[in-house]
Image (cartoon, rainbow, N blue to C red):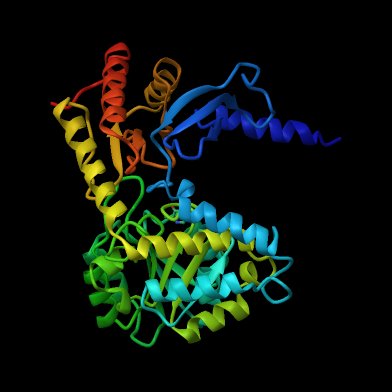
Amino acid sequence: MVDYNKAFEGAVAAVRAEGRYRVFADLERMRGRFPSALYYGGHDQTGAGETAKAPREITVWCSNDYLGMGQHEAVVGAMKAAADRVGAGAGGTRNIAGTTHFHVQLERALADLHGKEAALLFTSGYVSNEATLSTISRILPDCVILSDELNHASMIQGIRDGRSIKRIWRHNDLEHLEALLQEFPAERPKVIAFESVYSMDGDIAPLKEICDLAEKYNAFTYLDEVHAVGLYGQRGGGVSERDGVAHRIDIIEGTLGKAFGVMGGYITANAAIIDAIRSYASGFIFTTALSPVLVAGALASVETLKQSNHLREQHQERAARLKALLAEEGFPVMPSVSHIVPVKVGDPVQCKRVTDYLLEEHNIYVQPINYPTVPKGTERLRLTPTPLHTDDHMATLLGALDDAWTVLKLKRAA
Ligand SMILES: *Cc1c(COP(=O)(O)O)cnc(C)c1O
């Protein structure tokens, strides 16, 4: 007899043995008080946890709601108004009943944000990558996809689902990319798939140089700007806007769930490309459209961030300030040219210990980042300061890290 439960338990035991078992933090954000939240305890999927205890207030240092737009007046107001006006759900797929006027408006706003003819919404950034990349390789016959080695799991999955040959280029290595481009005849379709801000190290791809190579070898470009939309460029169009190369990228992909603070994903491109993806991508066609409430919130967020650089400037200032403070105090802050502030621990067990200690002793919430998300030996804390993290929050964090580093006998920078 097959013991089905045993197979599932065995799979979890293997994850535990590798030190990769995850416990979710049961949190309740308090609107108007982000980055503060209530912590109800740790939760695994069995429902076991310490929820019997009263919740306590903690400070979140690892949210991807990079600007606090998830609690912004304009965003929450638009969502309430939309729910009052049109109700909760979209009522179907986009083909059937799910194209609401909010969807049409948001797609126009996103196309405009990136200077493209058209845009297409998906239920998440993950789905937008997965659905688009797998569809591209079905539309372009004999296509080769050149993928940066640190590309996100959703891009890797999309490439795997398609029928193309995949070649991986060393992270941000232009010479390696060019060598791979040269391996294939000029008439063979080639897609270069990459990100702008890589979210674990906080480094940024050389977009202009990649576009130059794409032009030279007549390759198609697919750029994931998930960690940059809303955050870079004069209107929040991402690094491709900041660097003035958006018009040279064939497809720009982004999320509405991180800096925009809501939920959903999208691609923008010329009309022919969007029309084809819309017509072929299974992950677009056969799923209920995003709720118009979410879409209205995202629209307000995109428009708010288009109109003003204020939050973006504050965000960069906060990130620079935190990096400087950490460096002054001798913490091993890793080099990052973006808003992401990684602090190296270099050991998975210690990394988990630090974050447990910060939460238990100092009410500071930050997730340990371990293998396979990052290479072994580079385990780290990934801090994401927002405009709402004050000098006081930072002083408290520094004091807590100082205590943790001393108690756990961790290395400081030389
Ligand atoms: C988070 C993430 C995604 C997925 O976006 P969601 O909207 O969260 O599904 C895609 N690409 C990268 C690089 C990401 O970090």
The part of the image, by quadrant, that contains residue 216 is bottom left
Q: Is residue 354 above or below residue 135?
A: above
The part of the image, by quadrant, that contains residue 358 is top left
Q: Position of residue 149 (x, y in %)?
A: 36, 56
Q: Residue at x 31, y 61 (%)?
A: 308
Q: Residue at x 48, y 24 (%)?
A: 57
Q: Is residue 29 above or below residue 392?
A: below
The answer to whether 228 appears left or right of 269 in the picture is: left
Instruction: Please state, as top left, top right, bottom left or bottom right, where the C terminus lies in the image.
Output: top left
The answer to whether 10 appears left or right of 312 in the picture is: right
Q: Position of residue 84 (x, y in %)?
A: 66, 58
Return the residue nearer the eye: 47 or 71: 71
Instruction: Please state, as top left, top right, bottom left or bottom right, where the N terminus lies in the image.
Output: top right
Q: Position of residue 39 (x, y in %)?
A: 53, 26
Return the residue nearer the eye: 306 or 48: 306
Residue 101 can be seen, yes or no:
yes
The answer to whether 359 appears left or right of 16 in the picture is: left
Q: Residue at x 27, y 60 (%)?
A: 205
Q: Residue at x 50, y 69 (%)?
A: 133
Which residue ends up furthest to the right in the rendered image? 1
Q: Is residue 126 above or below residue 353?
A: below
Residue 129 can be seen, yes or no:
no
Q: Position of residue 251 (x, y in %)?
A: 42, 74
